[in-house]
Image: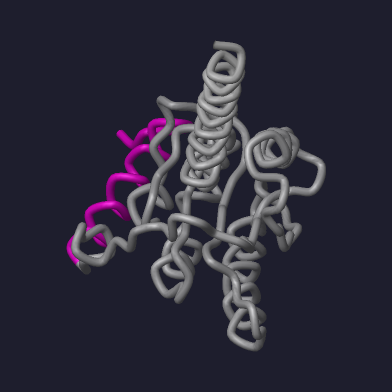
């Protein structure tokens, strides 16, 4: 008796997971921290999917100065994993030639069934992520989805929006802090003017 459908895919997933884990591709020691203030990122996703809209919406709201270099590709289907792996390699090669290189790569797509997301469980993409000289954020599917790219990537984000939030976190927090400081200084300035007025009138 052999499993069919999702059962067969789950068996294949576990087999590849054990293989790559034994090779050290998931080792915590090889994970790289993301730069606190990325200025330019590579984006690997479909140009027409929900993920790119979610990512752009978050970035425009939290850090509109962030530059995004899109490597458009399929994120579902039999050749999607090959297209995405080539996109990761191209971004690395392109970045190495730039005076202002990329800071990281965001690999993303929205939710779907196990079959829909299967391209992110293929060995060719896992190895491309592992070989990337740039840190990779895997932000695929929903919070409950765990894929091979999540284990290999430097950072796993629960959704595309969460991935964009992680990338823009430091800039967004700094902007909020500076806004609070400005408000506080404005209040102190007005209070100082009030004290000065009282001194002149007394």
Please state the horizontal and vertical placement of residue 199, each as a whole percent of the image. 53, 18
Magenta span: 1-22
Q: Is residue 64 above or below residue 132?
A: above
Which residue is located at x 55 percent, y 50 percent? Answer: 119
**Horizontal and vertical percent position of residue 160:** 58, 37
Left or right, 41 with respect to 157, comes to: right
- For the N terminus, the quadrant is top left
Q: Is residue 15 magenta?
A: yes
Image quarter of residue 157: top left
Q: Residue drawn at (64%, 78%), measured in percent from left and top?
A: 100
Left or right: residue 135 versus residue 98 is left
Report the magenta stretch's main SS: helix
Question: Is residue 115 among the parts visible in the rendering?
Answer: no
Q: Position of residue 54 (x, y in %)?
A: 68, 33
**Residue 89, x across and y down, in percent:** 58, 75
> Split into 4 quadrants, where in the image is the C terminus?
top right
Q: Is residue 151 above or below residue 141?
A: below
Residue closest to the eye, 81 or 60: 60
Along the line of sight, which residue is nearer the eye, 139 or 20?
A: 139
In the image, 17: left or right of 177?
left
Q: Quadrant of residue 88?
A: bottom right
- In the displayed structure, 39 sits above or below 118; it is below
Q: Residue at x 59, y 70 (%)?
A: 102
Q: Which residue ends up furthest to the bottom in the rendered image?
A: 97
Magenta stretch holds residue 155: no
């Amino acid at each position: 008796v052999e499993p069919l459908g999702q059962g067969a895919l789950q068996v294949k997933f576990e087999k590849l997971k054990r293989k790559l884990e034994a090779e050290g591709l998931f080792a915590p020691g090889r994970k790289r921290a993301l730069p606190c203030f990325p200025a330019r990122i590579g984006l690997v996703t479909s140009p027409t999917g929900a993920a790119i809209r979610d990512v752009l919406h978050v970035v425009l709201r939290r850090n509109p100065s962030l530059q995004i270099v899109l490597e458009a590709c399929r994120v579902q289907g039999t050749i999607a994993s090959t297209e995405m792996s080539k996109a990761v390699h191209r971004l690395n090669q392109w970045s190495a030639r730039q005076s202002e290189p990329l800071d990281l790569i965001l690999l993303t797509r929205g939710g779907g069934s196990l079959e829909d997301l299967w391209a992110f469980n293929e060995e060719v993409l896992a190895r491309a992520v592992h070989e990337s000289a740039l840190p990779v954020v895997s932000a695929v599917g929903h919070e409950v989805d765990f894929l091979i790219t999540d284990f290999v990537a430097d950072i796993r984000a629960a959704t595309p929006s969460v991935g964009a939030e992680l990338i823009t976190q430091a800039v967004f927090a700094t902007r909020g802090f500076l806004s609070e400081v400005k408000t506080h200084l404005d209040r102190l300035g007005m209070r100082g003017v009030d004290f000065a007025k009282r001194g002149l009138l007394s």
